[in-house]
Image (cartoon, coloured by chain):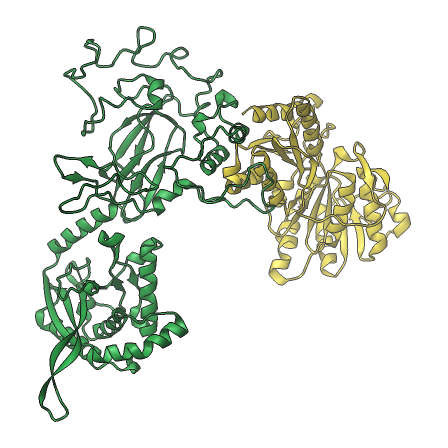
Chain colours: A yellow, B green
Amino acid sequence: MAEKTYLQAISDGLRQEMQRDERVFVLGEDVGVYGGAFKVTQGFQEEFGAHRVLDMPLSETAIVAGSTGAALMGMRPVAEMQFADFVSCAWDHLVTVAAKQRYRTGTPIPIVLRLPSGGGFSGGPFHSQNPESSFAHIPGLKVVCPATPEDAKGLLATSIEDPNPVLYFEHKHLYRRIKGEVPEDRYTTPFGKARVHREGEDVTVITWGAMVYTADEAAARLADEGVSVEVLDLRTLIPWDREAVLESVTRCSKALVLHEDTRTGGFGAEIAATIVEEAFEQLDAPVRRIAAPDAPVPFAPSLEKAYIPQVDDVAAALRDLAAY
Amino acid sequence: MSTGTQVEVVMPQMGVSVSEGTITRWLKQPGESVALDEPLLEISTDKVDTEVPSPGEGVLTEVRVQEGETVEVGTVLAVIGAAGTAPAEAPAPETPAAEETPQPEEAPQPEETPQPEPVAQTPSAPPEPVPASPPPAPAAPAPAAPAPPAPAPSVSPEGSGNGKTFISPVVARIAAEHGVDPGAVPGTGQGGRVTKKDILAYIESGAAAPPPAAAPPAPAPAPPAEAPAPPVAPEPAAAPTPQAAPAAAPPPVAPTPPAAPPPVAPAPPTPVQPPTPVVAAGAEFEEPMNAMRRGIAEHMRRSLDTSAHVTSAIEVDMSKVVAARERLKQEYQRAYGVNPTYLAFVTKAAVETLRDWPWVNGELRGEKIVTRSFVNVGIAVSLEEGKGLIVPVIRNAQDLNLLGLARAIADVAERARTKKLMPDDVQGGTFTITNPGGYGTFHGTPVISQPQAAILGTYALVKRPWVVQDELGQDVIAIRPMMNITLTYDHRLVDGAYSGGFLRDLRARLEGWDDGSA
């Protein structure tokens, strides 16, 4: 196995799917000649031709609506939003049409939207959001948030195979920072199965995306203080692995839910509520949440750092929980 | 959270039709700390027996309603003050009292106010004229607000208020499963709180005595909490917590026989504390009524005050029913596992007869007479060896054949005796049948279940000499299985002739029984 960046894993996975299945094609803004804003599709047009790597006008509405139509006709489009933030332009087609088509008429809509998301590099309020909870709330959509290169490739393959619209959130801050072993051969990573990123027995952290690494760093600090922290990477939010969460909380009896998205109505609220509903008698402390404050992502680096949950914040909360 | 405020504990509404409840047991005494949602007392209503969780956290400062008393929904039962509050006018200072209230002064006083008020009766009390006994500690006991830092002898170094007393859900569960008093466990959590690790270590160390005899045995040897739980969701009601037990087990009726009580031994081994019988003078015993008794007492009195009770009786030759039962018994038992009782036959015949005499199945509702195209027949079931009674209802009995009725009667009787009836099972009856004949009684005048119009009584089936006609039309004396049946009716609605017609037709159905009518 070769070590690859998170970005390479996505790119390789996508290329493999296109080689394997004629129906798979990509479309988006600058994905063709330019190779994508983050170079995920670099060289794709040369390899697969312009008819399978479509440069689209600056209209997310057209991209998602076109994908929906192509999927209805039997294709497997993989659309790139240049930034996850801009998927809001396509809300109507995604939420009103694509998400409900299967319920209304029985026709599957196998589209994948690749959504470069997340902050940490002064992208400002339009280029740093983590809007996963908005879509997790819409029945009919699946929400995928890989944290490792291996999962990025495997979950992309599963997303393309899935007959439903899948929102594939790829965290920009992981693109080149995170490297890991990635199998060369094609494989799929199942939806709804959490991954234990770090084993522990005193406190469970439930998280996903880039926060997996924030949690892991905090957990490493706590380990030095004699507190054993388990880090659970959900990998997919819809569906999410309730069993794994409840199992871990049952063992540790203390839970911290961590996400980079804003707090109110964030997906962490759903997880916390489920823990309290299903595992109340297992709890030895209140369930804690750490999330971004209810504000747009600030541009100034110092403010952004104060905004996005940091290792210090998580470590402090873990300390509190351990001492409770 | 709710520091500095008082929280009132009120009698909860346990169902739409429940208007009052009886305190069966206080789980906390004045002066004891109580956590939010911690079980505070047990109550009994005519629908359900249950624990009442504390609506706030702090110290139980005042108990206004004593065990055994019955009050209306919404009545203030107790007051919970902020942590550190002294019990209202209680003589003892905060903490020592938490352990076990020194009894001598309070015990014999039956009244609500346990105060040795104006006259300082207490012999040993210091001669001070001040009502509150002087705290042993420093001086100047500012009675108003507890001085912030000093007087609270809190174990918690941080003084987080709920530290020592707050029991987390998982600790409560483990404590219940192992019969451990969390208060006995040394706590290492915030403010001295007992953590899951603390209680597990405590149990592992063997410090935990075997569950006291008073506690109901834990249903299953609880899985060691550290062991990975089953991979699936931990079922919310993981293990039936022992707290649930008191509700299931009928409060053991106190050892008071009605008449000439033999010197009762200290009561059989009962899992639950019986309501402590108060010994009155001589050989007379007092015990609080349970909710069912009170319900019966109230209903019987109200019914007699409402309806104009008249009872008519008729003698029924049950020869054909006996023969039919003999024929069907084996078949029903073998094929359906159901015993076709005489009660089932009588019920079947009565339900059919009601069709022609709808007022017997009716109701006086204000100025209106209500009649119905259905019969919801209540079956009186005795409980607790005759010390209780409940009337589950078989709905739409007109739709059931003999087999269906026999099965329904067996079902409700079984569920009544095993306390599995739901509130709906005892409501909506339109006519009731009671069957005291099993004891050999041959006549009775039962009381109508309000707001119904009548109740049917069935009595002992006995062989008696009976004048019948032989095939020549001659009178002869034969031995016949005879049953007396009474109809007690509300004469406001049903007149003697009407009830007589009903009884005559009922008798004709039973005497002319053929299996086609089953």
B375 is higher (above) or lower (below) than A9: below
The percent coordinates of residue A198 (x first, y second) are 70, 34
Who is closer to the viewer here, A72 or B380?
A: B380
- Report the number of discs: 0
Q: Which residue is drawn at 9% across and 90% down?
A: B474
Query: In which quadrant is the N terminus of chain B drawn?
Result: top left
x, y percent for residue B179: 44, 35
Asked whether, in this view, residue B460 is left or right of residue A77, the answer is left
**Residue drawn at 14 percent across, 51 percent down:** B301
Q: In this view, does B9 lie above or below B151?
A: below
Q: Residue furthest bottom?
A: B472
Quarter where residue B7 is shown: top left
Outermost residue, top side:
B139
Furthest-right residue in this view? A46
Quadrant in which the C terminus of chain B is drawn: bottom left
- Residue B504 seen: yes
Of B201 and B404, nearer the camera is: B201
Q: Position of residue A100 (x, y in %)?
A: 62, 55
* Percent position of residue A147, x then y: 73, 38
Residue B311 relative to residue B156: left or right: left
Q: Residue at x 75, y 40 (%)?
A: A82
Q: In this view, does B503 lie to the left or right of B382?
A: left
| Foreground residue among A271 and A323 | A323
The answer to whether residue B491 is visible is no
Q: In this view, does B314 lie to the left or right of A150?
A: left
* A219 to B256, vertically: above or below: above
